[in-house]
Image (spheres, rainbow, N blue to C red):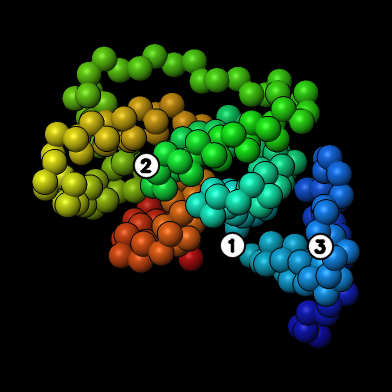
Amino acid sequence: SDMTTANELAKKAADLQLVIDKYLPAPSGSRGVCPDADHIAAELMWGGIWNEPGLDHKLRSIATITAQAVNGFDFGLRHQCRVGLSLGIPPQTLKAMILELRFWIGVPNTVFAFRMLQEVIDERKEWQALDVPVDAAWLATVEEMEKRGHELVRKAWGEKADQEMAKTVTHEFVPGAAAIVDGYHYGEVWARSPLSDRERMVSVLSALMRRRHMKQLRRQIGDAWNAGQSK
C-alpha cells in the first residue's frame, strides 16, 4: 500500500530526533504541556514535513533557521541553530548565512540571530573548536568588489539575474549607495562565504517567503530555475 501511516511518521520522527535532540541541554519546557501539540510536532513536522523529498535535512535546517531569524523569537531560533549544528552544519557556514541575510532581513534581526547562534555554539567545545573565522583579505576598492560581485552573481544565478540587479529602485535613485551595497554583499560577503549556491538560494527564498516579499520571491525563484535548481 502507498498509504502513509501515523506509525511510519512517528518512526521517522524518532529517528531524526535521535540526531537533532542529542545535544539538548535540557528537555523542552513546553513538552508535556499539551500532549496533542507534542503528537503533532513529532508526526507532522519531524516525521512528515522534514522527511519530504526535495531538500535534505541540512538544507531544510538552513531554510528553517532563516525563517526563525526573520521571526526573531529566541526559543525557536536557538533550537533550530542547535538542530543545524547537530546535523553537522559547521558554525562558520551558519554565521556566513546570517551575515548574508543582513542584506535581506536587516541588521537588528541578524544581530539577534548571531547572538542566539553564538550562545548555542558555546554549549559544546566541539562546536567552539570549529568556530574559526574566515582568513581572507578584503579588496581595496568598491569598484573591485562590484566587479567581482557581478562575476559571482552571473556564475551562480545567470546573466539575467545580474542584469536585473541594476534595475531596482535603489539603483535608480541612489546609485552610489547601491554600488557600495552590491560591492560588499556580492563581491565580498559572497566571496568569503562557505555557502554553496544551493544553500544560499534556499536561505534567500526562505527569507523572502517569510517576509512576504512576493514580487522579489517570484524573481528569485526564476533565478533558481535558471541556475538549474529544481522545484
3 or 2: mark nearer the eye:
2
Mark 1 → mark 2, Cα distance in angstroms: 26 Å
Near-viewer residue (66 or 27) = 27
Residue placed under numbered mark 1 in the picture? 54
Task: Look at label 2 and name its amino acid.
Answer: Phe
Residue placed under numbered mark 2 in the picture? 103
What SS does tag 2 mark? helix
Mark 3 → mark 1, Cα distance in angstroms: 17 Å
The spot of residue 56 in percent (x, y) is 64, 54
What SS does tag 1 mark? loop
Point out the tag, 3 or 1, that comes first from the N-terminus. 3
Q: Is residue 221 left or right of residue 14?
A: left
Q: Image quadrant of residue 12?
A: bottom right
Residue placed under numbered mark 3 in the picture? 13
Q: Residue 218, can we see it?
A: no
Task: Look at label 1 and name its amino acid.
Answer: Gly
1 or 2: mark nearer the eye:
2
Rate crowding at label 2 as few (under 14), some (14 to 19) or many (20 or more) other CA atoms within 10 Å.
some
The spot of residue 212 in percent (x, y) is 41, 64
Q: Is residue 63 above or below residue 193?
A: below
Which residue is found at the position 75% from the left and 62% from the top?
A: 46
Q: Is residue 106 above or below residue 214?
A: above
Which residue is found at the position 84% from the left and 40% from the top?
A: 25
Q: Image quadrant of residue 115?
A: top right
Mark 3 → mark 2, Cα distance in angstroms: 34 Å
Near-viewer residue (48 or 181) = 181
Rate crowding at label 1 as few (under 14), some (14 to 19) or many (20 or more) other CA atoms within 10 Å.
few
